[in-house]
């Protein structure tokens, strides 16, 4: 019997496994993807903004050094509202020496986590593996290979459409934003200087996130009915549209391709059931407007690791009811606050009603002129709370 079984070996699931195994706890991770794919994946346009608090966690579990080689520090953040002359500029040096965070390609994050996982004797990775039955009542996972994994605690880290959550009969709240996120990477003539720029346009946010070299990752929000038009454009037309929105970077070139996905809010009604709990996107999936999705998952993993290790020191095991309830209460509150913030921001800034536009511009100007308020928002962005 393994102490803890984790279904899902993505960024959050694997970081959770590493954190627990690093503390000497026996963990088994089950994932359907072949590790060879993780190590040999070509660039697919996906990047993550790793906040200060998250990279401190990743460093603590021994996974950061490998990732850092591929990371671009975010030194400044600029928030602007379409054509308004008012904006907010956040400088990392106003709240410390560390950058706000780093932009890293997801493939490099996953590869670094996989390499770290292979170093830990307490961590067993079963991949590729196919689950044929999940018996929550008897705490057993049956695999197509014929193996049966018994566990004390099951962690579901298998994404927004979680098989674990569905099997447990846990319902969830979903809200479609009627928007699509267009993701691509550009090379540009002028340097970005580590500046992340979030520009709020009538259709939704347009984020330019700095990557290593003269490259930036774009997260471009458009209404669901318009996004396919941009996706079908020739590269020259598509780049012309980008230049209208971020011409300050000089001549642009599209790297690889472009991707598009629907934007949706999902929040699980419960995070726990008996000796099972949910983390990451299996529990909550938010609008990308603040770039905090994976960071919430890392916060889940860090708290859960602390609670489990403390519980086991006290001889209470890995799945005591009070511990699981404590995890749910703490993480639900934090996640609800972020869900409310991102949902409100999206509604507020994806809006062309004149009074709201004026209020937005006024608000940006006020924040820029009040240092304590500015520092508060900077600490929120980096996770230094």
Image: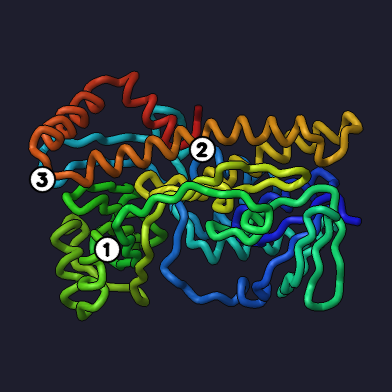
Which class describes the residues within 10 Å of circle 2: few (<14), some (14-19), or many (20+)?
Answer: many
- Splitting the image into 4 quarters, where does residue 75 fall? top left
Q: Which mark is residue 371?
A: none
Q: Which part of the image, by quadrant, shows the N terminus? A: bottom right
Callout 1: SS: loop
Q: CA distance from mark 1 to mark 3?
A: 23 Å
Residue 230 in the image: x percent, y percent?
Answer: 22, 71
Closer to the eye: label 2 or 1: 1
Of marks 2 and 1, which one's residue comes earlier in the chain? 1
Which class describes the residues within 10 Å of circle 1: few (<14), some (14-19), or many (20+)?
Answer: some
Closer to the eye: label 2 or 3: 2
Q: Which mark is residue 83?
A: 3
- Splitting the image into 4 quarters, where does residue 311 fall? top right
**In this rendering, would 136 be left or right of 316?**
left
Q: Residue at the spot x=50%, y=76% of the render?
A: 42
Report which residue position mark 1 lands on: 224
Of marks 2 and 3, which one's residue comes earlier in the chain? 3
Q: Is residue 369 above or below residue 74?
A: above
Q: Residue at the spot x=47%, y=50% of the render?
A: 266
Front residue of this view, candidates 125 and 111 = 125
**Is disc 2 in contact with disc 3, using a CB cutoff of under 8 Å?**
no
Of marks 1 and 3, which one's residue comes earlier in the chain? 3
**Which color mode does the image show?**
rainbow
Q: CA distance from mark 2 to mark 1?
A: 26 Å
Q: Is residue 153 above or below residue 383?
A: below
Total count of labels = 3
Report which residue position mark 2 lands on: 335
Q: Is residue 215 above or below residue 89?
A: below
Residue 30 in the image: x percent, y percent?
Answer: 73, 64
**In this rendering, would 366 be left or right of 268?**
left
Q: Residue at the spot x=78%, y=55% of the render?
A: 136
């Amino acid at each position: 019997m393994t102490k803890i079984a984790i279904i899902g070996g993505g960024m959050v699931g694997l970081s959770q496994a590493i954190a627990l195994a690093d503390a000497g706890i026996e963990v088994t991770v089950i994932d359907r993807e072949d590790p060879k794919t993780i190590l040999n994946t070509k660039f697919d346009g996906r990047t993550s903004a790793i906040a200060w608090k998250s990279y401190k966690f990743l460093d603590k579990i021994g996974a950061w050094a490998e990732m850092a080689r591929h990371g671009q520090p975010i030194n400044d953040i600029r928030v602007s509202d379409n054509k308004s002359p008012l904006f907010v500029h956040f400088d990392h040096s106003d709240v410390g020496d560390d950058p706000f965070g780093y932009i890293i390609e997801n493939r490099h994050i996953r590869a670094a986590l996989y390499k770290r996982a292979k170093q830990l004797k307490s961590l067993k990775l079963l991949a590729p593996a196919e689950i044929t039955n999940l018996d929550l009542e008897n705490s057993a996972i049956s695999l197509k290979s014929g193996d049966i994994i018994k566990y004390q605690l099951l962690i579901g880290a298998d994404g927004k459409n979680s098989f674990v959550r569905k099997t447990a009969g846990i319902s969830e709240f979903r809200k479609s934003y009627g928007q699509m996120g267009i993701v691509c990477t550009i090379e540009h003539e002028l340097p970005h200087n580590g500046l992340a720029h979030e520009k709020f346009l009538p259709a939704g946010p347009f984020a330019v996130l700095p990557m290593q070299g003269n490259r930036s990752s774009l997260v471009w929000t458009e209404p669901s009915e318009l996004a396919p038009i941009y996706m079908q454009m020739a590269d020259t037309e598509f780049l012309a549209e980008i230049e209208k929105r971020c011409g300050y970077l000089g001549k642009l070139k599209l790297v690889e391709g472009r991707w598009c996905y629907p934007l949706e809010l999902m929040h699980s009604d419960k995070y726990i059931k008996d000796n099972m709990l949910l983390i990451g996107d299996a529990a909550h999936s938010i609008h990308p407007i603040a770039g905090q999705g994976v960071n919430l998952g890392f916060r889940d993993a860090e708290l859960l690791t602390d609670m489990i290790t403390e519980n086991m020191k006290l001889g209470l095991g890995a799945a005591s009811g009070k511990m699981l309830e404590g995890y749910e209460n703490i993480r639900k509150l934090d996640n609800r606050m972020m869900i409310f913030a991102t949902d409100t921001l999206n509604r507020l800034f994806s809006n062309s009603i004149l009074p709201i536009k004026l209020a937005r511009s006024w608000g940006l100007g006020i924040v820029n002129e009040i240092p304590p308020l500015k520092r508060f928002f900077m600490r929120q962005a980096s996770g230094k709370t």
